[in-house]
Image (spheres, rainbow, N blue to C red):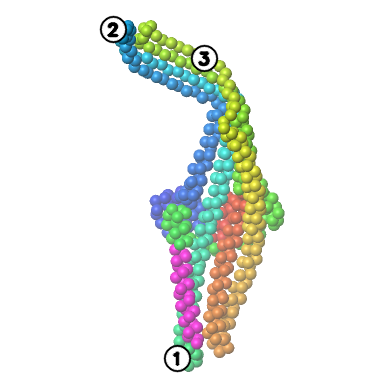
Amino acid sequence: MKFSKITVSVLLALGVQVSAQAADLIEIYHAAQDQDAVFASARAAQQAGQEKLTQGRSLLLPSVNLNANTTYNDISTTYGTPSAFLTNGTKRYNSNGYGVSVVQPLFREQNWALYNESDLQVAISEAQFKLAEQDVILRSAQTYFDVLIAQDTVQLTGAQKTAIAQQLEQAKRNFEVGTATITDTHEAQARYDLVVAQEIAAANSLEIKKRTLQQLVNGDIKELNTLGKGFKLESPSPADVQKWVADAQQGNYQIVMAQTADALAEQEVARNRGGHLPTLDLVANYAKNSAAGGSFGATDTRSTSVGLQLNMPLFSGGATQSKWREAEANREKAKQDMENARRNVELQTRQAYLGVVSGIAQVQALQQALKSSESLLQASKLGQEVGVRTSLDVLNAQQQMYSTRRDLYQAEYNYLLSHLRLKAAVGSLAEADLGQVNKALH
């Protein structure tokens, strides 16, 4: 019985071990979506980026401010000569008032540039989040297969140790009965000691890979589905690397981000150029002030004003020109960054495409090599029994077979990852692609 996405997510969030059934790749991915801190950070950054548009739009809309005041007044009045001051009286009273001011920008070149920039900043945050969505798919697959190859290495090392131990016992028996030399025993003992050290290193590597996966999903998963009969070798479609590169130049999110950053740098130049231009605002004010006492007794004053306000920047110590030059230099930097992104994406796409194509050839070659290694091992064992092969020949054949098997497993995992990386390079990697890889697991 498979756990549903919601069930797995809840169990992982509570730190419950999902070990009754082996977890598949899709379940790991769903858990990573819910629990991975890197992806959660990207999601929060995307939500924050959405607010840039509202902030940019606010620069074009009116701003309204309310102010209020209240003051206690204690006034004493005296008059006369210094030798004969006369007190006219003391007045104590409260005065208070409030006012509302409205400013509607009519012409502010910098505000329009900032509004255009905010739209681009939202586009960048969206591209960054799309990139993070693809990244969590790749990291889920990578950490999943890292655990599988570590498990395979532990199992193969254990099987190799068992086989060498049998050769060691046989060498000892043959030496005791005089049918073999002590050299055979020493050779087998040396191989056995070496494989014990390799087994310890493999177990340590497996523990680290498991911890990495647990960190990704924030939970403890004991078992994982492994490659089964569903594994198939499929060539890229279309089988044209230039078509993949062309698609990557259009859809890769790294290029999208670089292009948007270039447009943003262009707007930044326009904004700083606007620092030389005047600003024009429509300004309206309303104020009311009241006083309970004073020279004229109780007073109540109201005032209303509506007008245009023009500001012309004349000199700011050279800061405006400096910022303009800085923005132009950053624009050139953005153009070079965009070109660098294009080149890197083309390289990544070609590498992923070749990873799939050469992966198919490598897997097929290793499958044949494994059959040959198994045949060699059987022939070496038979030759040892009839005396035409030595114990060393058998040990070498065993090591070759286990090494070939481990290389085959690694090549199969790399082939599957290359398929995902190729889809990511063109910006089309999605859960459905991970589902296709998941079909190869059981």
Tag in front: 2 or 3: 2
Point out the stretch of residues depicted in magenta: 183-207
Q: Tell me what residue is drawn at x 57 percent, y 32 percent.
A: 317
Report, in whole angstroms, how far the alpha carbon at label 2 lies from the one at label 1. 137 Å
Instruction: Say whether disc 3 or disc 1 marks the residue closer to the N-terminus.
Output: 1
Q: Tell me what residue is drawn at x 50 percent, y 17 percent.
A: 285
In the picture, the disc for residue 305 is 3
In the picture, the disc for residue 84 is 2
Quarter location, residue 104: top right
Q: Picture coordinates of residue 15 (x, y %)? A: 40, 53
Instruction: Kindly give the residue lying farthest to the bottom in the view shown.
Output: 178
Tag in front: 2 or 1: 2
Instruction: Say whether disc 2 or disc 3 marks the residue closer to the N-terminus.
Output: 2
Which residue type carries mark 3?
Ser
Nearer-the-camera pick, 296 or 407? 296
Tag in front: 3 or 1: 3
Q: Tell me what residue is drawn at x 36 percent, y 17 percent.
A: 71
Is 74 contained in the magenta span? Answer: no
Is 373 rendered above or below residue 216? below
Q: Picture coordinates of residue 300 (x, y %)? A: 41, 10
SS assignment for the magenta stretch, majority:
helix
Query: Dot 1: what SS?
Result: helix
In the picture, the disc for residue 176 is 1
Which residue type carries mark 2?
Ala
The answer to whether residue 115 of the structure is visible from this angle is no
Q: Picture coordinates of residue 95 (x, y %)? A: 37, 14
Task: Check if mark 3's residue and mark 1's residue have beta carbons within 8 Å.
Answer: no
